[in-house]
Amino acid sequence: MGALVFDNQVFDSWLTAKSQEILSKVDRERITTEEMLVLILKAQTNHFHHMDLEFREEFKKIDNRFEKLYDFMKWQGGILLALFAGIYIKIFLG
């Protein structure tokens, strides 16, 4: 079975079966415009599925980068806060 697209198992099953049926007769006889549209739709759903997988992987990489950046910014913020607190204490209280 092909990739599940649009979270619709019934549609995906029908589209996979129909496209396999059409592909089996491509070499033997001429296919209709409607059959060509079914094949195009199957190709597009496969493309959507692969792009979805690629985008999810890229988003995971981006999320990891932001986590590392956020961790660094927390430490940097803590150091700056301690620095400004020390300056405040020295100037106004000390």
Image (tube, grey):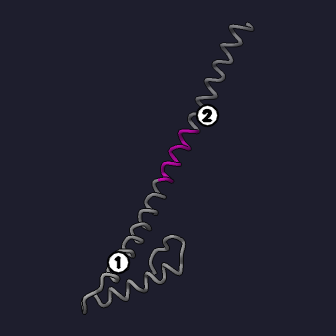
User: Which type of secondary structure does the marked residue at label 1 adopt?
Assistant: helix
Residue at (37% x, 89% y) in the render: 21
Q: From what the image shows, is residue 81 above or below residue 94?
A: below
What secondary structure is the magenta-colored segment mainly? helix
Disc 1: CA contacts within 10 A as few (<14), some (14-19) or many (>=20)? few
> Is residue 84 covered in magenta?
no
Q: From what the image shows, is residue 28 above or below residue 77?
A: below
User: Which type of secondary structure does the marked residue at label 2 adopt?
Assistant: helix
Please indicate whether residue 33 sits to the left or right of residue 52 in the image.
left
Seen from the viewer's position, the closer of residues 29 and 92 is 29
Q: Mark 2 or mark 1, which is nearer to you?
A: 1
* Residue 85 sits in quarter: top right
Real-space CA distance between mark 2 and mark 1, rounded to the nearest whole angstrom: 54 Å
Magenta range: 59-70
Residue 80 appears at what percent x and percent y? Answer: 61, 23
Quadrant where the image shows the C terminus:
top right
Q: Amino acid at mark 2?
A: Lys
Please indicate whether residue 46 sits to the left or right of residue 28 in the image.
right
Q: From what the image shows, is residue 63 above or below residue 38?
A: above
Seen from the viewer's position, the closer of residues 44 and 68 is 44
- Residue 74's label in the rendered image is 2
Residue at (48% x, 51% y) in the render: 61
